[in-house]
Image (spheres, grey):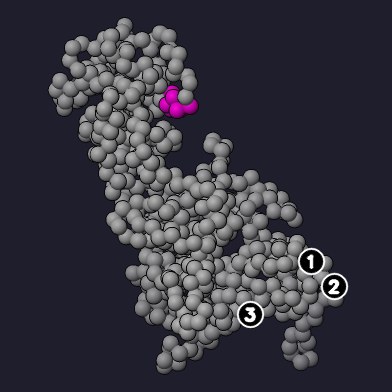
Amino acid sequence: MSHRKCGNPVVLVSFSNRPIMSKRQAELPLEDNFPGSPASKKVRVEEDPESDPRNGAVPAQRASSQELEQDDRNGSNILAAADIEGEGLREGEEDNAGSSDIDEDAPAISAPKRQSAPMEGYGDLYLDTINRGVLDFDFEKLCSVSLSNINVYACLVCGKYFQGRGPKSHAYFHALEVGHHVFINMGIKKVFVLPEGYEAKNQSLDDIKYVVDPHYTKDQVVKLDKEVHDAWDLSGSRYRPGFVGMNNIKANDYLNVVVQLLAHVHPIRNFFLLHEFPTPGTPQLALRFSTLVRKLWNPKAFRSHVSPHELLQEIALRSSKRFTLTQQSDPVDFMSWFLNNLHLSLGGSKKPSSTPTSIVQAAFQGQLRIESQAITAHSDTQNARLVFTESGTINSQVTPFLILTLDLPPTPLFQSTNRESIIPQIPLTTLLNKYNGITASEKLAHRVRHRLLHPLPPYLLFHIKRFSKNRFVSERNPTIVTFPSPRSLDMSPYVEPNPQIWPPGEPIMYDLVANIILDPTVAAPGATEDAADKGVSAASGAGGAPSTSAGAGAGSEKVSWLVQLHDKAMSAENTRHQPSEATEPQQRGPEWLEVQDLFVKRAESETLFTREGYLMVWERRKTPGKKGKGRA
Ligand SMILES: [Zn+2]
């Protein structure tokens, strides 16, 4: 919950505001704070134009490395506002040419020497001041002073972000002011000691670099679903990588469950774990989602939860505040928006395409046929009633889908004395009949029939439509959707036969991977007990004011969201460790886990359908020995 990035701007604000000509004044606070400190000396040396070699030739070696270029470019960005006189060049030069130029001009009083390397035997200097416990790289990388996101370093002692590392940079002053000396560049993941400026190369820093940006080999990714490897965080708590909590900063649980779900759809997960995104060139949405997925599966994490803060910032920006961390939204609305935007940010085609143009389409996109018949109403005046006639022409159209909507039957309006006993239930297969091509629904004076088409996608997203809205009321339908098992859902009855792709009558098996659940028991303050209790209707807005927010959480009814996830590796291990003659199953661990914000707990597979499922993802089972039918 901490917004630690906000730092103390006191000294540096005076710097950035100072007029160009009055540099000397700016030295005062530093001199006051650090009498005789090398800092003041250093600054004075810097500001003497005569002795400033930077006005002359640029040292040769500085052009070499990418990071210097970056420093340079950024330097000019950062400092332009504060100080226009060629400040841009300073930082980069200082990195390399530092020690020599100071030696020439520096008086006997010790100046902080810029060093390209630590002094012999002092390679580990300051490394013991690093405090891993305060490091949290999940928050947006903004300098705590300038609020810029360019060339940002994290102080490894206090965890705050600062821009730049050259003299005059915010990180540099932080080092002088507070005495924190070790910083990591968030982009290139190199650690520097300031004010000296040399790179600290020590293997003991590798764990920090890994936490900044976890990465995986193909081999490691393959094993994620086969072998259980326990992991321990800094506090010594055990956690399962991939099954960790996600911070609900304010009201972003709707987003957390969607991210968790997608991070367990294997093609999506594997793509974002392994793909090397070109930077620059990749939109932030894809980059930040990738980082979050990598952190979710991090086997060497410092803490056993993640924060979606960076991704949320980008989503709020790209959705023009439609999806934010302060206002709860409908997970399905968000999912639709996110899948489309992720698809586009990965370079997917805007036009409909029969072959997938992104990993999003490859995982979820299928096609369905919609047949519609116009219905006309005639008034039969003799008998004083309306007569409906179906048109003889049937309009048939094929359309792609990413999410299938399943409609719940209306809930009975009566209430029994024992409310709990009357929560209606309906089998998932009954809801799926919407797609059998026979069952018709009526929509805008049309009779409509749906049927799925071969090939079905590798993953099916089912949206159980619980919210209906009219002008005044947002209603939630609490019907429980049942299915006998999270395994072996046969989708073949809902697909139009196509013998060329799939033998008619052959089942098409899907297994549940993740299930987003609406939890009505957590009601927002102001929601009446009655509404939360019966779960049926909650008027929007306490004073009858029409709600402006969409979908779930609309009006006074606030619900919370959680997700149940299948642990495939645990499932595999449980199967492997099953002694053949044992009568009682021996479980190494739970195969289903339930994540609600920061909390992770075991979920019994039997309880998967006793809650209000809202968005499910089912995975198509691979059929051994059916060549070329994999995606049928
Ligand atoms: Zn610090």
The tag on residue 109 is none
> For the point 45% across and 90% down, which residue is it?
421
Instruction: Answer few, some or many: residues within 10 Å of disc 1's Cα (few below 14, many 20 plus, some between 14 and 19).
Output: some
Nearer to the camera, 124 or 577: 577
Please, what secondary structure does the residue beneath circle 3 have? helix
Instruction: Answer few, some or many: residues within 10 Å of disc 2's Cα (few below 14, many 20 plus, some between 14 and 19).
Output: few
Q: Earlier in the sequence, mark 2 or mark 1?
A: 2
* Residue contact at pointers 1 and 3, CB within 8 angstroms: no
Please, what secondary structure does the residue beneath circle 1 have? loop
Could you give the CA–CA distance between mark 1 and mark 3, rounded to whole angstroms?
23 Å
Task: Decide: is 435 above or below 231.
Answer: below
Residue 416 picture location, percent across and down? 45, 92
**Amino acid identity at mark 1:** Ile
What residue did someone put label 3 on?
A: 429
> For the point 69% across and 72% down, which residue is it?
508
Q: Is residue 25 visible?
A: no
What residue did someone put label 1 on?
A: 501
What residue did someone put label 2 on?
A: 393
